[in-house]
Amino acid sequence: MLLNYASQGATEAGAQVEKIMLRDLNISPCLEIYGCKKTGKCVIQDDFQKVYDQLLGCHGLMLASPIFFYTVSAHTKIFMDRCQSLWVKKYWIDKIPYGQRNPRRKGLFISVGATRGKKLFDGTLLTIKYFFDILDAELWKALLYRELDFEEDVLKHPEYLQEAYEAGKEFAFALKGEY
Ligand SMILES: Cc1cc2nc3c(=O)[nH]c(=O)nc-3n(C[C@H](O)[C@H](O)[C@H](O)COP(=O)(O)O)c2cc1C
């Protein structure tokens, strides 16, 4: 729901938004066979191939995942692991020095968890930072909400939905270099 609001904000600010529902796709986990070693392209032929093209073609990525056991959902993690092919391309094929950053994309991360612990998002943010790095994306903003367990819970916080909408809008402007 939060991602929908962010997408709406981005769309209204003029961005062209393509939505990807990972759970509706057939994406195998990374099998660590390193078939990507030659070209940087994953050799497993499934729905990841389409997402891969979309990833390379985008200027910004808005990623939303609930917290499952202090990290992203399994669907999200499987998707991230398949992007190891991009890591291989960047560091093994193109031989970019480790740690050299040249972010040409921006990322907005949205997450929710049921509990209210101080460290609820710590591990996930580290994962996201390194994942975005592979996409040459900087973590532009993270919207993180605690104490949301059931779908309707977020409706009790219209300010969260408003914040997501505004963030989507600002994100689109930032991508155009207007913010
Ligand atoms: C498998 C599983 C693991 C979860 N692990 C955590 C957790 O580690 N910490 C937490 O605060 N909430 C945890 N939750 C609760 C979810 O983060 C929470 O229900 C969230 O609102 C789900 O968001 P969604 O409805 O957008 O998928 C877990 C839920 C499931 C189903």
Image: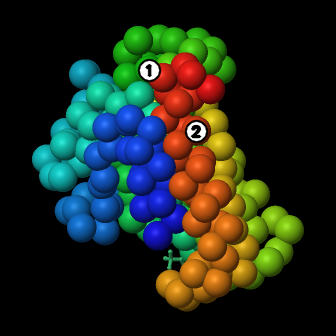
Label drawn at residue 170 = 2
Q: Amino acid at mark 1?
A: Lys
Q: Name the N-terminal-most of marks 2 and 1.
A: 1
CA gap between label 2 and label 1 equals: 29 Å
Residue in the picture at 72% in, 73% down: 146
Q: Amino acid at mark 2?
A: Glu
Spot occupied by residue 93 in the image (x, y as percentages of width and height): 38, 15
Compared with residue 132, is residue 177 higher up or lower down, i.e. above or below?
above
Ligand 1 is in which quadrant of the figure? Answer: bottom right
Residue 110 shows up from this direction: yes
Q: Is the distance from the Cβ of mark 2 to the nearest ligand 1 atom less than 8 Å?
A: no
Crowd around label 2: few <14 · some 14–19 · many ≥20 (10 Å) = some
Spot occupied by residue 97 in the image (x, y as percentages of width and height): 58, 12
Residue carrying label 1 = 90
Quadrant of the image containing the C terminus = top right
**Helix, strand or loop under label 2:** helix
| 176 or 101: nearer the viewer | 176
Farthest residue, direction right: 118
Colour logic: rainbow
Q: Quadrant of residue 56?
A: top left
Compared with residue 108, is residue 24 higher up or lower down, i.e. above or below?
below
